[in-house]
Amino acid sequence: MNALQLAETLAACHDLEASQLLWLLEHRDPDVSEYLRKEAQAAAQARYGNKVFIRGLIEFTNYCKNDCYYCGIRKSNRQAQRYRLDREDILACCDLGYDLGFRTFVLQGGENPWFTDQRLTEIVRAIKEAHPDCALTLSVGERSRESYRRLKEAGADRYLLRHETATDSHYQKLHPPELQLSHRMECLSNLKELGYQVGAGFMVGSPYQTLEDLVRDLRFLKEFKPHMVGIGPFLSQHDTPFRDFPNGSGELTLFLLSVIRLLLPETLLPATTALGTLLPNGREAGILHGANVVMPNLSPEEARGKYLLYDNKLSTGAEAAESLELLRENLRKIGYEIPVARGDSLIAPDR
Ligand code: 5AD
């Protein structure tokens, strides 16, 4: 096999077998990477034009009942200063975001049982009532099918739940025993069946990850066909059990962004905050490798300083209109614009 030939096949057919993907990952070099980058950027542009969609991220609580070994807001981290925003705080973030041109809001939080279906559906209804022309995305972890159903009925349109790794044994190394890959996958298929636009994804370079694991992630994505795929480098957090593991590779993250764009040309692909944290101009680099979404932070300043999943997290918010203008300007320099639009995936919801 020849890596450049495999890259050409991937660009032409939008598919490769597991053994071919593994070869490609093992034999990546600057020529293959640059070829895939160009093809991925062209594939995104052919479908979404020179548009980068923005989503206003509202990190509304960092209380979490889970104890994921990589995450700075895991329940055992006594150093984390816990908070939750109330409905009025959240609505104020949305109002501000709306005026800045956001038409999608993402409510992200730790798994916090205080946010019962009752409380969360009230918040969802209030946001959709205030901003009926906006899409609402939830990212609040594993819940029951019934809970997902209620939230959908209340008006939620989309749901982000990274699968984290598609390899059972690797999942067990990243999570305590009460968390199971089979349950994560069940949640993802429930979300899809209920008609959400669904986002999956994983960290690049998480502890114990092998290239074979990444190939299983890619094959899973190809088969599950999420509407969005969120990937970013693993970044160590000093108060977690994984504090001594090295950060994931920016080069491999960018390579994988291109591969994912070509495997799933219609998917929405964010240039994530983790990528922006690892690499200078990481978000712009992500766009040039086939990404087409950026998720600026709309959380209030005090919250941003506490939602620390990993060290050195970028925390300039978009609430200051200037920083959104700066993003707009940086994207304009590489030929992209930010529309005032929901930015729905070209992949239709399952129902
Ligand atoms: N480094 C990078 N990404 C992380 N996440 C959690 N902790 C880290 C970390 N230390 C990612 C997980 C999760 C998402 C919200 O943030 O993939 O799904």
Image (tube, rainbow, N blue to C red):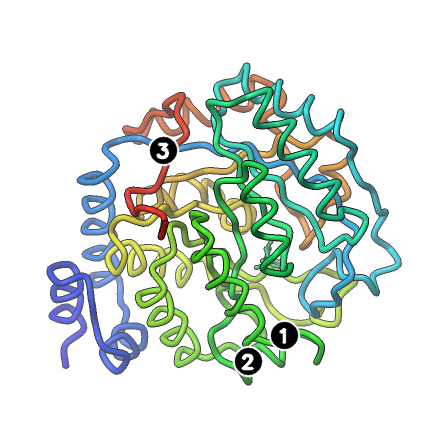
Q: Given the image, on which type of amino acid does mark 1 rest?
A: Leu
- Whole-number angstrom distance, CA of label 2 to CA of label 1: 7 Å
Is 33 situated above or below 86?
Answer: below
- Looking at the picture, how far across and down is residue 212, in whole percent? 39, 81
Q: Which residue is mark 3?
A: 52
Mark 3 and mark 2: span between their CA atoms?
A: 33 Å
Residue that mark 1 sits on:
174
Tell me the element at label 2: helix
Q: Are the two marked residues, 2 and 1, in contact with CB atoms closer than 8 angstroms?
A: yes
Which residue in the protein does label 2 denote? 170
Kindly identify the residue that appears in the image at 49 percent across and 44 percent down: 158
Estimate the x, y position of residue 1 in percent, counting from the top left.
Answer: 14, 81
Closer-to-camera residue (144/318) = 144
Q: In the displayed structure, would residue 275 be above or below residue 215?
A: above
What residue is rendered at 58% in x and 74% in y?
Answer: 207
Percent across and percent down for residue 137 are: 53, 41
